[in-house]
Image (spheres, rainbow, N blue to C red):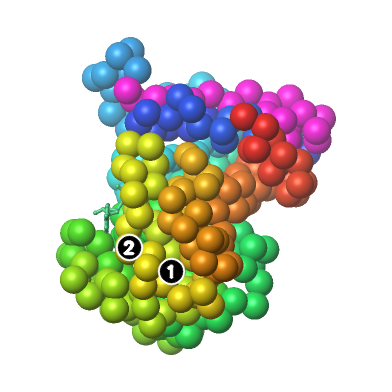
Amino acid sequence: MTSSLLLGLIGDGISASRTPRMHENEGAAHSIPTIYRTIDISNPRLAEVGLEELLTGAVRLGFDGLNITHPFKQQVIGLLDEVDPVAARINSVNTVVIDSTGRTTGFNTDVTGFAAGFRAGLDGAATEAVVQIGAGGAGRAVGFALAELGIGELIIADTDVRRAEGLAADIVEATSVGTRAKAIGLDELEGAAASAQGIVNATPVGMKAYPGTPVDTSVIGSDTWVADVVYFPLETQLLAEARAKGCRTLDGSGMAVNQAIDAFELFSGQKADPQRMRETFLSF
Ligand code: NAD
């Protein structure tokens, strides 16, 4: 059994991440002393350091695992010894397990994390037609998770229409469950949102730096469910307006907590306690 864990998160501007505390608390609760460091490329000390050097350094220094976030989730794939088939299919890795020989294996727990959060928070929600706004890093994970959840038709909008088209094509190609996926322009978004059974925001709109809503909520019906991946703040303007209409809503905490739950199990071989992980996440 793992006797201690040395973990890290590699990314840009991650000093406020809640992931380190979730892993350290959970490790302690399993009597596994756990140190989890942020390796933030916005730190001037790392100004000239590339991802390959950071990964090699972590392996050499005896790290047991890493989480990978923006802007490295795709770049890291080419640097790993092995990539789990799900992560390879979506072309995005957010978790790297480093074994005792230094061998690296990449996984994607954003996909499983969003799916678990969805099952817990929107159980039984209608999923025949769903509109997803945003096809960037989080959006790719959300799109594949929705497909695996059995969405009938996924309609994807992004200000960068080529990103939306690329994600729709990848989902159609990769999924065996027969999800239909298509990209639409922003000019078609309101019409699609008005007739969808569910809407997911996977853009940064709703964060303090990006105020507002990604779609005009006056077009959304009260029987439409609305999910957001933004978790700074948890109550985005989109969710507040949707809730005021009587819509079922899902905030970004489910994805954030469940990606850490799944990563903890990969790092430690132990099952994390979902309630404790959630309480740690919310305790900031
Ligand atoms: P990103 O920059 O990779 O992707 C954002 C995408 O949204 C881009 O493709 C962009 O073109 C598009 N976009 C931006 N504004 C838009 C608009 N008004 N209409 C349509 N498309 C628009 O960013 P990301 O890494 O995917 O992060 C997005 C959000 O998800 C952030 O708020 C981040 O904090 C959050 N996030 C949450 C979790 C979680 O666990 N809950 C995990 C990862 C990211």
Front position in the image: 162 or 193: 193
Query: Do tag 1 and tag 2 residues touch (Cβ < 8 Å)?
Result: yes
In the structure shown, which secondary structural element does the residue marked by tag 2 occupy? Answer: loop
**Alpha-carbon neighbours of circle 1 within 10 Å: few (<14), some, or many (≥20)?**
many
Residue 136 shows in the view: yes
Q: Is residue 218 left or right of residue 245?
A: left
- Residue 126 included in the magenta stretch of the image: no
Residue 67 image point, x, y percent: 49, 39
Q: Which residue is found at the position 36% from the left and 72% from the top?
A: 219
Residue 269 image point, x, y percent: 71, 46
- Residue 36 included in the magenta stretch of the image: yes
Q: CA distance from mark 1 to mark 2?
A: 10 Å
Residue 229 image point, x, y percent: 47, 53
Q: Earlier in the sequence, mark 1 or mark 2?
A: 1
Q: How many marks?
A: 2
Front position in the image: 235 or 140: 235
For mark 2, what is the residue?
Answer: 215
Residue 76 image point, x, y percent: 36, 43
In the structure shown, which secondary structural element does the residue marked by tag 1 occupy? Answer: strand
The amino acid beneath tag 2 is: Val
Q: Which residues are magenta?
A: 23-42
The amino acid beneath tag 1 is: Ile
**Alpha-carbon neighbours of circle 2 within 10 Å: few (<14), some, or many (≥20)?**
some
Residue 76 shows in the view: no
Q: Which mark is residue 199?
A: 1
Q: Which residue is found at the position 53% from the left and 77% from the top?
A: 223
Q: Which residue is found at the position 39% from the left and 33% from the top?
A: 11
Q: Which mark is residue 174?
A: none
